[in-house]
Image (tube, grey):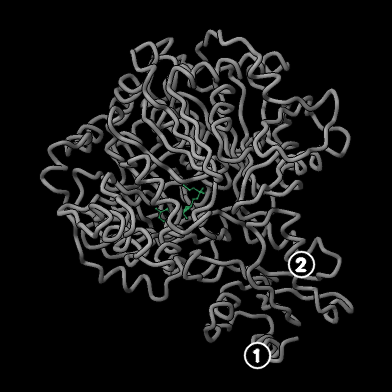
């Protein structure tokens, strides 16, 4: 199956997980204009769109020069002579770490806080730009002393602690390519990613804290490196929770012995604008995750530009908190690169929102006076479930901009976010006259940075809509044939023109890059999302139209989970669907056909869930596993997941006329009733 295979009814299936969302969305007519006060102080004014339309490459060139410091200026904004392989800011030379660190210190901002860190147990650290620069220089020296040079890959398997950011920037400084693997992925998933990228160095920690308890990380690295023949020379281990760890002499090194002892002198050199900055693996529609490749100049330009304009950043006064883990792209672009290149003060929190109590986030907002909060709808819906009285106990008056990312935000969650978080003017129930604007930001690992979002001082926002392509971005909604749909219609979301932070490819697989994103529609990037234009031409995202699920804002591939299930000896066949879930957006539901006597094993469901956890990671464990005697297939043998999705969501199965065996849905339903 090709990566860009589109399943299900075109687009208008509601995969956002909220009943008749499409219908509701189209009746959503609330509008919230920015206040006069916000407009007058806003970073981004209405002129940006017009400027970008006049001369797009010129617009991006201006952003690149104004937001970044180049070691050598570029000669051309965009080289698009070999699409879909773009080159941005041709011949330019730049160092990402210098842009995120040294230059702020040189500009007299050394004492500004770069990172406020709060660990789950309540320990805190503060890094000024001067201190963070020093730490990154030490890490850069240490990595070099371990033989890491420009172009080498470094795998990062760390919790949300400052060393994660330090590691990313130290790699960038020396031109090494980081590949961050989310700590929730299993040893097997880590091994695949280490092997695919041929990483030379792995950076991890003994562990982290989760819900008040130490939780281990290093054992997964040990497990991943158990087999012979890998490329890893050293494992650098940050001491975080002081739990005992196994040690491989000669390979394993403590961060404190290596980095802390290294010299704090390190001169950054400019790297080519197209020097690979990082690889980040993400789920596609096949079983094998793709290593999405990002390069330097264009990526930094667009992350900095969007971070400044979409969040209305005032770096000297704002405290910015993006709650994403660095294991995801949001943690790359909006925890590390965008904010630090812009000289912002950021908050990093290690733990879960309910530890030690359900008000922890709001306590942090109050304590650090967070002014910009960027999070995911799944978190907002969880807080809704916990109750509005929890955030109401805290003073959230510092908040002035709210962001959402990762999945469609339903209007109810959007309104709750505005009324409960954005309107809070104190812990005694005071309300703001002008609630904080909400920016719903659409983008992907592949796009590198925000693509569609309101501008908070310009756009009258609509609950549930990402609305407008940012100045410099040309997005559209097209029909099956690639024709632009008129207002009021739905179709597929595409990007028509190259953008600076676009992926430059899939690591080691240029053909898959073309095939996955550029073959569905001619000369357009196909994102895999369904979307709709409303009567004003604003864009509403409707969820994935391919075999990718979105669970709590995390991308998971149905095929990958199916492969994991069938790799278990008890499973003959498996089909996985994302079923609507009130909190997580979608939940993983698996239908399995068991082999032989496996059905008699009362523990089989638990065993299979654990197996998926081991193969991919706990985030991929199916919420529900249903044992069935058969699966619905078309005459060509393709599983009709749409019908299974109907069952998983408790509906009558839809049109099954294209099934090879028309009676099969009846058989499955009967068997589920009986509980095979
Ligand atoms: C979904 C996360 C609706 C979408 C930055 C996309 C969204 C996928 C939104 C990318 C949004 C992200 N509204 N859907 N504001 N933001 N998505 O690569 O389906 O983890 O294709 O990047 O998340 O997920 P990824």
Name the mark on residue 373: none
In the rendered view, tell whether residue 438 sits above or below residue 384.
Answer: above
Crowding around mark 1 (Cα neighbors within 10 Å: few <14, some 14 to 19, many 20+) is few
Reading the chain from its start, which is encountered first: label 2 or label 1?
2
Q: Is residue 208 visible?
A: yes
For this view, does 502 lie left or right of residue 436? right
Image quarter in which the C terminus is found:
bottom right
Along the viewing direction, whichever of 517 and 232 lies nearer the viewer: 232
Give the residue drawn at x 79%, y 41%: 224
Give the residue drawn at x 67%, y 62%: 621
The percent coordinates of residue 25 (x first, y second) are 31, 68
For this view, does 477 lie left or right of residue 281? left
Give the residue drawn at x 85%, y 82%: 600
Along the viewing direction, whichever of 485 and 170 lies nearer the viewer: 170
Q: Quadrant of residue 292?
A: top right
The percent coordinates of residue 453 (x first, y second) are 32, 47
- Badge 2 marks a residue whose secondary structure is helix
Q: Residue furthest left?
A: 36
Residue underneath mark 2 = 608
Q: Is residue 481 visible?
A: no
For this view, does 635 lie left or right of residue 6? right
Along the viewing direction, whichever of 265 and 92 lies nearer the viewer: 265
Q: Quadrant of residue 115?
A: top left
Give the residue drawn at x 29%, y 25%: 58
Image quarter in which the N terminus is found:
bottom right
Residue underneath mark 1 = 666
In the rendered view, tell whether residue 69 sits above or below residue 215.
Answer: above
- Badge 1 marks a residue whose secondary structure is helix
The percent coordinates of residue 244 (x first, y second) are 78, 39
The percent coordinates of residue 189 (x first, y second) are 72, 47
Crowding around mark 2 (Cα neighbors within 10 Å: few <14, some 14 to 19, many 20+) is many
């Amino acid at each position: 199956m090709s990566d860009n295979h589109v399943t299900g009814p075109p687009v208008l299936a509601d995969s956002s997980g909220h009943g008749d969302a499409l219908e509701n969305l189209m009746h959503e007519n609330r509008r919230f204009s920015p206040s006069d006060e916000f407009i007058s102080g806003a970073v981004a004014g209405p002129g940006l769109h017009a400027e970008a339309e006049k001369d797009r490459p010129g617009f991006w060139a201006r952003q690149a020069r104004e937001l970044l410091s180049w070691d050598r200026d570029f000669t051309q904004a965009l080289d698009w002579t070999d699409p879909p392989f773009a080159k941005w800011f041709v011949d330019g030379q730049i160092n990402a770490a210098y842009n995120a660190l040294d230059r702020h210190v040189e500009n007299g901002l050394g004492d500004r806080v770069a990172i406020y860190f709060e660990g789950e147990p309540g320990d805190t650290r503060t890094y000024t730009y001067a201190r963070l620069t020093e730490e990154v220089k030490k890490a850069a020296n240490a990595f070099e002393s371990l033989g890491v040079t420009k172009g080498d890959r470094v795998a990062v398997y760390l919790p949300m602690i400052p060393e994660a950011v330090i590691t990313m920037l130290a790699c960038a400084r020396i031109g090494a390519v980081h590949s961050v693997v989310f700590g929730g992925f299993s040893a097997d998933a880590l091994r695949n990613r280490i092997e695919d990228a041929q990483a030379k160095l792995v950076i991890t920690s003994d562990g982290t804290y989760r819900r008040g308890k130490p939780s281990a990380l290093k054992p997964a690295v040990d497990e991943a490196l158990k087999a012979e023949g890998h490329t890893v020379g050293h494992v650098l281990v940050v001491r975080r929770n002081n739990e005992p760890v196994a040690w491989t002499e000669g390979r394993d090194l403590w961060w404190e012995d290596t980095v802390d002892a290294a010299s704090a002198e390190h001169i950054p050199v400019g790297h080519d604008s197209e020097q690979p900055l990082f690889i980040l693996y993400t789920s596609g529609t096949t079983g094998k995750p793709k290593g999405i490749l990002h390069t330097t100049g264009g990526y930094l330009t667009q992350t900095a530009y969007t971070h400044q304009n979409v969040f209305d950043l005032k770096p000297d006064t704002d405290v910015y908190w993006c709650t994403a883990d660095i294991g995801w792209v949001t943690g790359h672009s909006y925890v590390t690169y965008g904010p630090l290149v812009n000289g912002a003060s950021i908050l990093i929190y290690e733990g879960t929102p309910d530890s030690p109590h359900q008000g922890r986030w709001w306590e942090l907002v109050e304590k650090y006076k967070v002014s910009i909060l960027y999070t995911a709808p799944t978190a907002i819906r969880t807080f809704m479930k916990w109750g509005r009285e929890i955030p109401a106990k805290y003073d959230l008056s510092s908040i002035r901009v709210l962001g959402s990312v990762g999945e469609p935000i339903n209007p109810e969650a959007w309104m709750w976010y505005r009324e409960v978080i954005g309107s809070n003017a104190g812990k005694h129930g005071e309300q703001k006259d002008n609630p904080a604007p909400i920016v719903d930001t659409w983008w992907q690992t592949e796009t590198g940075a925000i693509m569609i979002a309101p501008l908070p001082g310009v756009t009258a926002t609509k609950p549930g809509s990402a609305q407008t392509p940012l100045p410099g971005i040309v997005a559209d909604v097209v029909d099956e044939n690639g024709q632009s749909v008129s207002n009021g219609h739905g179709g597929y979301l595409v990007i028509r023109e190259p953008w600076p932070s676009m992926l430059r490819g899939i690591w080691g697989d240029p053909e898959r890059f073309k095939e996955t994103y550029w073959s569905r529609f001619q000369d357009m990037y196909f994102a895999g999302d369904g979307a709709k234009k409303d009567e004003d031409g604003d864009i509403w995202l409707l969820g994935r139209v391919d075999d990718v699920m979105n669970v709590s804002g995390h991308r998971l591939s149905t095929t990958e989970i199916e492969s994991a299930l069938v790799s278990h000896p008890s499973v003959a066949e498996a089909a996985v669907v994302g079923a609507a879930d009130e909190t997580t957006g979608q939940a993983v539901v698996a239908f399995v056909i068991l082999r032989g006597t496996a059905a008699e094993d009362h523990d089989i469901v638990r065993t299979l869930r654990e197996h998926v956890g081991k193969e991919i990671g706990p985030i991929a464990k199916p919420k529900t596993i249903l044992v069935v005697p058969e699966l619905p297939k078309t005459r060509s043998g393709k599983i009709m997941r749409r019908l299974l999705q109907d069952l998983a969501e408790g509906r009558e199965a839809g049109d099954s006329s294209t099934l090879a065996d028309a009676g099969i849905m009846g058989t499955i339903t009967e068997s589920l009733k009986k509980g095979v």
